[in-house]
Each structure stands twice: as structure tokens, then as C-alpha cells.
Image (spheres, rainbow, N blue to C red):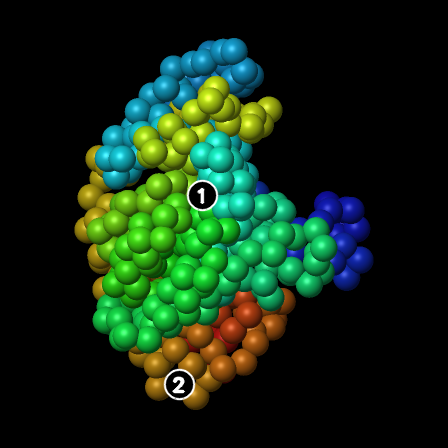
Amino acid sequence: MTNFDRTHIWHPYTSITNPLPTYPVKSASGSRLTLEDGTELIDGMSSWWCAIHGYNHPVLNAAAETQLGKMSHVMFGGLTHEPAIRLARQLVELTPDPLQYIFFSDSGSVSVDVALKMALQFWHNQGRPEKHRMLTVYGGYHGDTFGAMSVCDPITGMHKLFSGAVNKHLFAPRPEPQFGSTLTATDLEPIQQLLETHNNEIAAMILEPIVQGAGGMWFYSAEYLNAVAQLCKKYDVLLILDEIATGFGRTGKLFASEHAGITPDIMCLGKALTGGYMSLAATLCNERVRDGISANDGILMHGPTFMANPLACNIASASIDLLLKSDWQQKVATIEQQLTHELGKYCSHDAVADIRVLGAIGVVELHKQIDIAEAQKAFVAAGVWIRPFGKLAYLMPPYTINTTDLSKLTSAIGLILE
Ligand SMILES: *Cc1c(COP(=O)(O)O)cnc(C)c1O
């Protein structure tokens, strides 16, 4: 079985002829993955930010089964359905007030592409097609499609590999002031400069609010985010916040933008939207963006085949209800405390460059690159599932994890320091 996997299937960002080892999973339940050979692993990844309630959850299973008996999919062109309408209402209710209009798509990257299209169509329709570039910061990650990739960090985002095919946008330095710190006068200068010089060609600024995820697990100052939002207003540039990783409580707020008390013009959601059950994403916008796109009979030019998939929408609705009914804030706060305490012990270790904790995210940054295959082997032997990248070993467990399991995860990180 694994041999065919090795010889025929690409895994994320890997060679198919010289693949890294993969571990066959048989099932998953709660915060445990069970491998084909019976090994149980405690999950420290929530399958890349998604499985916030843990796996195989009875409520989400029921939502899937109920919807399966009705219809698993119908086209969204010319048809509509209750699961999509109910989910849209919930998202409009949950997100900041001005975000009222919604476009459903099938993955985070596509929801970012849709956000970029919204911004471009908005200005085009105002008779300002010259406002067609994006402004963002280094260290960002917004997905792997061409639109999304063009606003990812140019180095980790593989711009060289695809140069010529990826649009050239504008990049300010990575937001330096860390979460919890205050701004100094110079922190905003580069962005202010870029906006001052280029505002006539910039359609939108796109950012991951507070947490830069796959681009480096960096937590930056809420004051910085707030100030950037003010600058966007001043220079009449739309603000797109990519809450795909941060949405649904991961940072201790329902949406990370709440830390800064700001509302974007356009917001992207994905990942934990279905509690990790299915691929689904959404792009929301405010009235100004809606009206701009819609003027002169404007239509939004996007329409994926699996748009607003009813099965995914029904599970997403159930996942949101489940989250709101739970004491998620308390759970995330408890995880935050435990991560701070237990990962904090490593801060004096020679191999460790930095420890960062925010909400249910704990990051240990080493001085050296981590050998993923080696580390993975050690983690699996220790009974945990943690997947490092670059110099970073990090944890973002399901919110439902218990303290004993979380301790096993934090202890396991100690293994790769040796
Ligand atoms: C994962 C991620 C994406 C891309 O989502 P996919 O579902 O993988 O396409 C976009 N933005 C952020 C911030 C992400 O973490």
C-alpha cells in the first residue's frame, strides 16, 4: 500500500521520485490519529489548523449523514439551498457587522483569488483600472494558486520558480513589532512610503491578521494591524484580511482582527470553517465593495463547480454551532497557559532561538533547520503527530485536547532539541 503511495502520489511540496516518508493513517478520533499498524498518535496539528473539535465528532458526523440523505451536492448556478443560506446567515452574523455579502468557494487559496478579483473588479468598475496592484508584507502565506501565490512571501512563495507567471506586487518588510508590543515611529515608514508613492496603482492591501502562519509562524503587534488599517483608509486602498488560519478562535478571539479592533473591506475564511471535515471557504465583503463591483451591471466573475457544496455547508453550520455552544474561549486560554508554561521551559536551551505562544498556537523556533524526516520519526516513536517546517516546531492542537495529551506534545518537542 505505502509502496504505491511512494511511487505514484505527490504529497505537499515533495518530490515524487525522492519522497519523504509518509505514515498511513487508519482512523482518527478525538485528538488521536491511529496508524495502520495500530500506533496511536496525539494530534498536535489539527490537520493544519482545521480540526478544532477533534476528529470523528458525533455532532459533525450527524450533520454529514443528515445532509447525505438529502443531497451531497448540487450546482449553485441557478439553484440555491438551505445549508448555504443558513451558513451565510451564521457567517454574516459572526463576522464584524459591515461584512454582509458572501461568496462560497472550495478552498482557502480560491477564496483569496476571489478576494483579489473583488478588489480588482471594484476599482475597474469605478473607472480606475490603474489600481490593479496588491500591497502586502514579507513573510505572508495566502495559498498556492497563482493569484494567492503572487501575494505570498516572494522567497518561500516560490516566485523565482514561477517568475514571469506570477504578477509583481508590492512588498513591505515583515511586521517587526511582536504581538503585545507597542509601535515605534519607524515601524510603519516602509508601508507609508509604498502607499504614498503607489496608492494610485494599489487596489488592496492583503494581510494575515496578527499571525503570519505558513510563512513563519510570526505573531505581530495589534497596534501595527490597526495602524495599517488606518493607512489603507487614508490612501483609499481596500483592506483584505486573510483569516483562513486565524478564524474561529485559534488566537483567542473568534477572528484575529478583533485583537486590533478593526474590520476589513474583504475577509477570507477557510480551514476550521468545517471543523476539518471538508474543503470549504468563503470570501465576505462590505457594502462599499459590493456596490463597487455591482455598479453598471457588474457581475462577480467567479463560479467554482463545487461552490457552496451542501454537505460542506451543513457540516460548517454544525461546526459553528458546536464552537459557539462550547466554552472555546476558556479552552483556548487554558491551552495558551499550558503552552506558555511548558514550552517556556525550553527557552534557555542552546538549540532554541525563540518561543512564541498565542491562543492555541505554540511555536519553538530553533537556530538550525529541522530535518523533517528525522524529526517526524522521533515524534511518531514518541506517540505524537507534530510536523515541523524550516526552523520551526509548533503545536496547534484541537481545542478539545486534554492537559495530559498536551503535556505529551510539549514534552515531545524537547526530543528534537537534543
Ligand atoms: C492555508 C492557508 C491558505 C490556503 O488555503 P488552502 O485551503 O490550502 O487553499 C490561505 N491563507 C492562509 C492564511 C492559510 O493559512
Looking at the image, is 288 positioned above or below residue 299?
Answer: below
Q: Earlier in the sequence, mark 2 or mark 1?
A: 1
Query: Quick check: 347 left or right of 134?
Result: left
| Placement of 229 over or under 363, stated as above or below | above
Q: Residue at 76% across / 54% down in the picture?
A: 16
Give the numbered dot on residue 349. 2
Q: Secondary structure at mark 1?
A: helix
Q: Is residue 205 left or right of residue 163?
A: left
Please report the residue visible at 41 percent of the width from the left and 61 percent of the height from the top: 196
Q: Which residue is mark 1?
A: 271
Q: Does the beta carbon at disc 1 come under 8 Å from ligand 1?
A: yes
Whole-percent x and y of residue 245? 42, 50
User: For the residue marked with disc 2, what is the amino acid?
Assistant: His
Q: In this orientation, which residue lies closer to the viewer: 383 or 60?
A: 60
The picture places residue 18, in percent across and down from the top left corner, at 77, 61
The residue mark sitting in front, 2 or 1, is 1
Q: Looking at the rendering, in which quadrant would you find the N terminus? A: top right
The CA distance from mark 2 to mark 1 is 33 Å
Give the quarter of the image for residue 228: bottom left
* In-image side of 272 versus 222 (left or right): right
Q: Position of residue 87 (x, y in %)?
A: 35, 26
- Residue count near mark 1 (Cα–Cα under 10 Å), binned few <14, some 14–19, many ≥20: many
Residue ID at (22%, 51%): 261
User: In this rendering, does residue 333 appear at all?
Assistant: yes
Q: 10 Å neighbourhood of mark 2: few (<14), some, or many (≥20)?
A: few
- SS at mark 2 in the image: loop
Examine the rendered structure and indicate whether residue 140 appears above or below residue 290. below
User: What residue is drawn where x is 28% and y is 55%?
Assistant: 230
